[in-house]
Amino acid sequence: MINTASSKEKIIKWVLVSFALSSLLFLFLIFLFIFVEGVPLFHKIGIKNIIFGFKWAPTKGFFGIFPMIVSSFLVTFGALVVGAPLGLSCAIYLSEYSGKRMKMFLKPALELLAGIPSVVYGFLGVIYIVPIVREYLGGPGFSLLSASIVLGIMILPTIISISFDALMSVPKTYREGSYAIGATKWQTIFRIVIPSASSGILASFILGMGRAIGETMAVIMIAGNALKIPTSILDPLRTLTGNIALELAYATGDHRLGLFSTGVVLLIIIMTLNYIANFVIKRKVIK
Amino acid sequence: MRNWVCCLSLCIILFLCACHNSPSSSFGHQKKSLTLAGSTSIMPFAEKLAEHFMLDHPHFIINVQGGGSTAGIQAVMNHTVQIGMSSRPLKEDEKLSSVIICYDGISIVVNPKNPINSLTIAQIRDIFGGRIKNWKELGWIDRSIDAVTREEGSGTRGSFEELVMHGKEIDDGIMVQDSNGSVKEVVATDPYAIGYISMGIVDKRVKALVIDGIVPSVETIKTGEYKIVRPFLYVLNGEPDNDVSTFILFVLSKEGQNLLKKEGLIGAYD
């Protein structure tokens, strides 16, 4: 009797292990697939001509994605400029100022913000933000600025929830010590709480960047997708993700491989960002 | 453990079955199914044709899918679909046969608020080539031109490059949208935009420009005056079987051609 029970336990354990490993397997398969499809072109065209090439005309044999790499980072940076101050202030309010009831109302609302599909954000951007930018600031409206605003809002939930956790994990004794020597609430937050939580806050920014750089649908709808490196924040631009999604439907042969190469570059950038975020978080734990 | 393996394999089999669900194979009826895929420019018209064809031939089921000209041609090569739809002529290395089902004009469109009514081909080439950047150069206000093109590989873009750009490249600073509909949407909402779309979908929200003094219309295309015209093709791999030829004969019949003409296209025989 005991024997069958323990063997049942074992079966369950192995079932769970195989499920857990299957997610790893999927990750591995995705990597394998993208690299197998994407790397041959690097061989054929040359890494330098792809990553530092300025001209993207895959049907004519040009595969330069440098403007898109730059654009991806510009949009991401823009999203941070919009999202980071907003997100951080919201997290500070939630952890330091708001009462329990407010927290109970705000937290689910933020989770809802995270659950809104990106195409809805893109749609709102096209309907409201793009015409406003075009009307009052000039340019076509489909621009770096519009994309940054929308992406900045989209990364808010990531930034808020992770920096909120970081702020909450600052021990109460730190705050009490600060009050005890006569610091005001704001001084305590600014000089004690934020510096203590800085690695978590930094990690939240980096993860927000990861989300912004990987965003596709909203960016295609708002960014205008021009191939040039933008010279002002009112110029249209095309990101790496936008390039893949925009052209995949029509792509064949080397053009298709070129899109996979774009995917390889994107994957490497996102992996690096995630690695940095993990590193930043871990450093804090070891301390 | 064995139960688990059985269960998993059952799941996989069910999943594969679900993926491979074509109407004719899953139900035992003698329904014949045809699948068309390709150009998003042709898709709405192909759907109309399919609807009418299915009314007359109830034992047929016709699926029409988008994907783009190149994807359609690719799908015919792989035998994934029986008929591909292409809005650009076949390339030399695409060894397939094709049937012209009709012709379609490409209209250069601007926002209705734009007072400019006509441009020359050379001016349009300069706008999309990045040499004319301001509406002032064309006799309107001092405001940059928001030109919109289609993405690389699109059939409409391919035809535009050939018929308007004459081998000159479209500038990198031009905005890109990925369907006729999105280009129309941008032009309809942005007073300073200019783009090109299939003539069949031009409506009141955008204004089609007179090119070199010739109004884009079915008549001017028929007389050969309006030059920005491309064929719509059905692409086949090898000899068509009975079902495919029944459908194509319907499309080329008087009834099918009239349907296309009613949509603003130009018949294959005109």
Image (cartoon, rainbow, N blue to C red):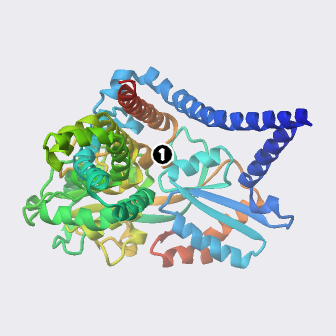
Quarter of the picture holding the N terminus of chain B: top right
Which residue corresponds to mark 1?
Answer: A248
Q: Foreground residue, B216 or A7?
A: A7
Report which quarter residue A243 is drawn in: top left
| Residue B179 seen by the camera | no
Q: Is residue B131 found left or right of A122 in the rendered image?
A: left
Q: Foreground residue, A9 or A270?
A: A9
- Which residue is drawn at the image coordinates 66% and 48% (left, top)? B237
- Which residue is drawn at the image coordinates 41% and 53% (left, top)? A217
- Establish if A45 lies above or below A144: above
Query: Could you tell me which secondary element the residue under label 1 belongs to?
Result: helix
Q: Foreground residue, A23 or A161?
A: A161
Q: Position of residue B10 (x, y in %)?
A: 82, 46
Q: Position of residue A45 (x, y in %)?
A: 41, 24
Q: Tell me how many marks there are.
A: 1
- Establish if A242 lies above or below A129: above
- Which residue is drawn at the image coordinates 75% and 48% (left, top)? B16
Q: Position of residue B148 (x, y in %)?
A: 29, 56
Report which quarter residue A109 is drawn in: bottom left
